[in-house]
């Protein structure tokens, strides 16, 4: 999971959403608390102004306090709702305060103004209090009036908790919706990378030559870099094959000269030296021919696909024109429209080596059968010859092993076929059929492509 971009984005998105929802919940709770306090303060101010009706002006310009209005909210002791009115030296309190006096050490607000304070209650609880300052009476000596109305702050805290309790389910539902949207966004956003991965898999399987640029703009630079890397690799492989071919061709002329010198030595009676030189030169020529054949093998990734039936038919047509092939009964049974994942030139060389090998060992008949089989193409080449000794069957693809009784074989044909099959990621099976011998090739099947030409086996 630590290496997955998808899960990293999901984890980062989940953390961001959780942090955002937590901050939102805290912010909404704080806003609700402030709003609740503003509403409570407004209500307390209205109650303070209502208590001002307790003041009764006198004819001499003074004032006195009337009995307080009946209000059950302020009649129950320690109800959490309190008031206290001070007119001059006279102070009256709500019954809910019982024998407790609200502290009023701070100076009273100026007449006509209010002050919001937090005061200790009769039980030590915190009270939200509003002090209203007024001035009563006429003349030069008005009587100051101080009204304090308070309520328990626990009511505001309970309201805030109730708000949070109602808010949390909606925040959880919002978080789930945001996580779903985030997952969908990540999935859609990573689809171009999945397409690049599919195209890279196509490169590996040989289904496409390059990634291409028909992709979103953000991943086109990556696709271009991969395609340029593949171009450089193919160019380097082509140069390497060319250098190997040039080196092998360069060895052929000196080797041929050595064989000529060996013939001259044999003519002069130096039989042992001539045989030694011919043995070394023949072994070196086998190496050279093997490297020439391997230099021509194409990478399976670049294989555009080949049709085994038409290629086998053309090869059989060529072999029938040879003296040995004219005596063979060639039987070809190939299903039409089949295409294998292998370069046409490589398939031509592999089938040519197997058909020539079958022709040399057959008594009368060589059969070629091409059939589809479970997503693959099976090519079986059988002859009615004597077969191969079981002791040598497992080592037929080793370089230099030739079982041709005529001595014309170089012992590299099946080794080259094995190299071609490995490069195309196919399979080669060799077995005796009693009587006879069979070589079977299996390659991955591709979709038919009628426009693909078959190579000239000449």
Image (spheres, grey):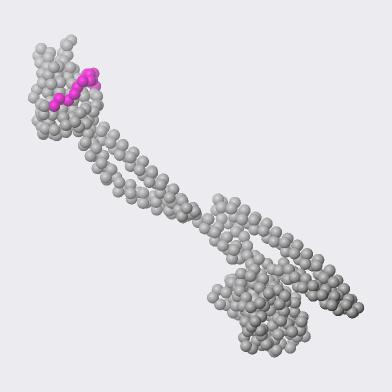
Image-based side of 196 in relation to 400, left or right: left
Depth check: 167 or 390 in front?
390
Residue 428: x %, y % from top left: 62, 75
Residue 121: x %, y % from top left: 18, 29
Relative to 134, is 301 above or below? below
Q: Quadrant of the C terminus?
A: bottom right
Residue 5: x %, y % from top left: 49, 53
Depth check: 37 or 63 in front?
37
Depth check: 283 or 234 in front?
283
- Asked if residue 57 shows in the view, the reply is no
Task: Residue 68: name its quadrant.
Answer: top left
Q: Residue at x 82, y 70 (%)?
A: 255
Q: Residue at x 19, y 24 (%)?
A: 103
Image-based side of 9 in relation to 321, left or right: left
81 in the magenta segment = no
Residue 237: x %, y % from top left: 69, 61
Image-based side of 400 in relation to 67, left or right: right
Depth check: 195 or 275 in front?
275
| Number of marks drawn | 0
Q: Magenta region, mostly helix, strand or loop?
A: loop
Q: Which residues are magenta?
A: 100-113
- Asked if residue 302 shows in the view, the reply is yes
Q: Residue at x 86, y 71 (%)?
A: 257
103 in the magenta segment = yes
Relative to 167, is 436 above or below? below
Q: Residue furthest right?
A: 268
Relative to 81, is 242 above or below? below
Q: Residue at x 38, y 46 (%)?
A: 18
């Amino acid at each position: 999971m630590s290496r997955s971009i998808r899960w990293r984005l999901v984890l980062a998105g989940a953390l961001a959403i959780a942090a955002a929802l937590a901050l939102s919940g805290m912010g909404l709770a704080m806003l609700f608390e402030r709003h609740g306090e503003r509403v409570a303060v407004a209500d307390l101010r209205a109650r303070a102004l209502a208590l001002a009706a307790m003041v009764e002006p006198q004819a001499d310009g003074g004032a006195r306090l009337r009995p307080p209005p009946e209000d059950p909210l302020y009649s129950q002791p320690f109800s959490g709702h309190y008031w206290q009115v001070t007119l001059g030296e006279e102070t009256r309190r709500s019954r809910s305060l019982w024998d407790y006096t609200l502290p009023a050490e701070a100076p009273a607000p100026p007449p006509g103004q209010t002050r919001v304070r937090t005061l200790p209650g009769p039980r030590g609880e915190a009270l939200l209090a509003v002090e209203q300052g007024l001035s009563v009476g006429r003349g030069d000596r008005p009587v100051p009036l101080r009204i304090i109305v308070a309520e328990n702050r626990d009511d505001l805290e309970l309201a805030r908790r109730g708000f949070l309790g109602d808010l949390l389910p909606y925040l959880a539902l919002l978080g789930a919706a945001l996580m779903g949207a985030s997952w969908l966004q990540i999935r859609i956003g990573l689809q171009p990378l999945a397409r690049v991965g599919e195209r890279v898999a196509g490169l590996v399987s040989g289904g496409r030559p390059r990634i291409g640029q028909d992709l979103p703009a953000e991943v086109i630079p990556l696709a271009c870099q991969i395609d340029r890397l593949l171009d450089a690799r193919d160019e380097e492989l082509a140069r390497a094959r060319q250098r190997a071919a040039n080196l092998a061709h360069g060895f052929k002329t000196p080797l041929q000269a050595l064989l000529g010198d060996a013939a001259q030595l044999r003519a002069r009676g130096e039989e042992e030296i001539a045989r030694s030189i011919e043995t070394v030169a023949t072994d070196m020529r086998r190496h050279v021919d093997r490297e020439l054949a391997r230099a021509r093998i194409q990478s399976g990734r670049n294989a555009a696909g080949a049709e085994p039936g038409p290629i086998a038919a053309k090869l059989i047509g060529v072999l029938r024109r040879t003296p040995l092939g004219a005596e063979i009964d060639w039987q070809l049974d190939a299903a039409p429209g089949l295409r294998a994942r292998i370069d046409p030139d490589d398939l031509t060389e592999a089938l040519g080596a197997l058909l020539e090998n079958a022709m040399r060992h057959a008594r009368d008949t060589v059969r070629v059968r091409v059939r589809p089989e479970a997503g693959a193409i099976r090519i079986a080449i059988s002859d009615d010859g004597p077969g191969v000794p079981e002791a040598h069957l497992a080592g037929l693809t080793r370089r230099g092993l030739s079982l041709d009784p005529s001595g014309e074989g170089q012992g590299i044909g099946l080794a080259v076929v094995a190299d071609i099959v490995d490069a195309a990621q196919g399979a080669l099976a060799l077995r005796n059929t009693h009587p006879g011998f069979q070589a079977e090739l299996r390659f991955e099947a591709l979709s038919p492509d009628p426009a693909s030409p078959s190579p000239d086996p000449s």
